[in-house]
Image (cartoon, helix red, strand yellow):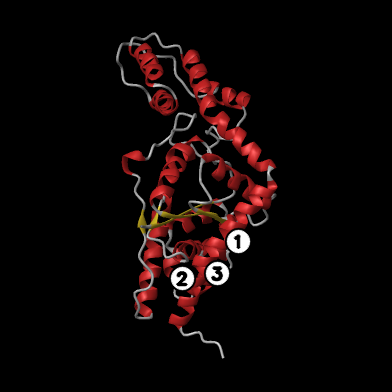
Amino acid sequence: MDIVLSGIRPTGKLHLGNYFGAMKNFIKMQEENTCFFFIADYHSLTTHPTPEDLHGSVKHVLAEYLACGLDPEKSTIYIQSDVPEIPELYLLLNMNAYMGELERCTSFKDMIRKQPDNVNAGLLTYPTLMAADILIHRSHKVPVGKDQEQHLEMTRTFANRFNRIYNVNYFPEPVAYNFGEELVKIPGLDGTGKMGKSEDNGVFLADDVDTIRKKVMRAVTDSGPTEPNQPKPDAIQNLFTLMKAVSTPDTYSFFDEKYNTCQIRYGDLKKQLAEDIIKITSPIRENIEGILEDNEYLRKVAKMGAEKARESATMTIRDVRRIIGFRQF
């Protein structure tokens, strides 16, 4: 059985893209693998060194994880900062991470451009912290987006380098978890690209009914088709892609035919789309709200997750210390 690890920063709420693109697969994944899901609160400090409400953000993400269907009995769900073995492994990996390779990292170059007044050591060594997150459980697979592929490659480099330096075969070289055709890519409402937190083009799982309706009605459209069966522009195709994910096949076919026969009324399509999104998100939103009010349950989940994560992490740190040569007198 593979050990699979995935993390999310507590810097924003989950949106439909997260739900269809990852969460639904995570729910299946926990049935077939040994899964670790963590909230990366240390990572969030690299871009938000003085967070407004770190604890509140962590709490909200934890509630969303649980509301979407992750099961703390089947998976290990934990908060990064509750596992002190992670920063210890981070320190040890940094001893064999070289400035040149860290400075060449694409994400580091991007962040220098985005936050020139906050180029901190955490940004530079972000790949080593990510490697520590993965290697602390000796993970085999990691679900990663395109922007994280280089970091995963660096994790393999660090794992291989550790094994080579100390002449052991201890750390596995993790690979990307490939969802294949099961991975649904949800577009944004602005007519471009995928749904995201920073692009302000998403519908969030915690959005209320009125907010969802307003967002969908503002979605980018055009003046409509001028001849039958013409290709859909990107913005319109995005709406149909979203409809395919949330609506019934009959609903999708109805509006697709209306478009192909030049009878489409975008207002009607958006109203239907909004109601179908609401049908999916309302139970999740209500579940999120209920879990957020149950502090005792959240404490129980976080405590259980920390204990399970530390059981794995402690064994790794014990082995790594022994391999490097640390001994107690």
The amino acid at mark 2 is Met
Identify the secondary structure beneath mark 3. helix
Tag of residue 81: 1
Q: Which quadrant, please, contains the N terminus?
A: bottom left
Residue 212, placed above or below residue 156? above
The front one of 279 and 164 is: 279
Residue 297, placed above or below residue 246? below
- Work out which residue is located at the far front of the displayed protein and give it: 73
**Residue 199 coordinates in the image, percent (x, y):** 53, 38
Residue 284, placed above or below residue 26? above
Task: Locate residue 185: give its quadrant.
Answer: top left
Q: Name the mark nearer the viewer: 1 or 2.
A: 1
Q: Which residue is mark 2?
A: 99
Task: Locate residue 255: give its quadrant.
Answer: top left
Give me the C-alpha separation between circle 1 and circle 3.
Answer: 9 Å
Q: Are marks 1 and 2 in contact (CB under 8 Å)?
A: no
Q: Residues within 10 Å of mark 1 (few under 14, many from 20)?
A: some
Q: How many marks?
A: 3
The amino acid at mark 1 is Ser
Q: Which residue is mark 3?
A: 85
Q: Residues within 10 Å of mark 2 (few under 14, many from 20)?
A: few
Q: Residues within 10 Å of mark 3 (few under 14, many from 20)?
A: many
Q: Name the mark nearer the viewer: 3 or 2.
A: 3
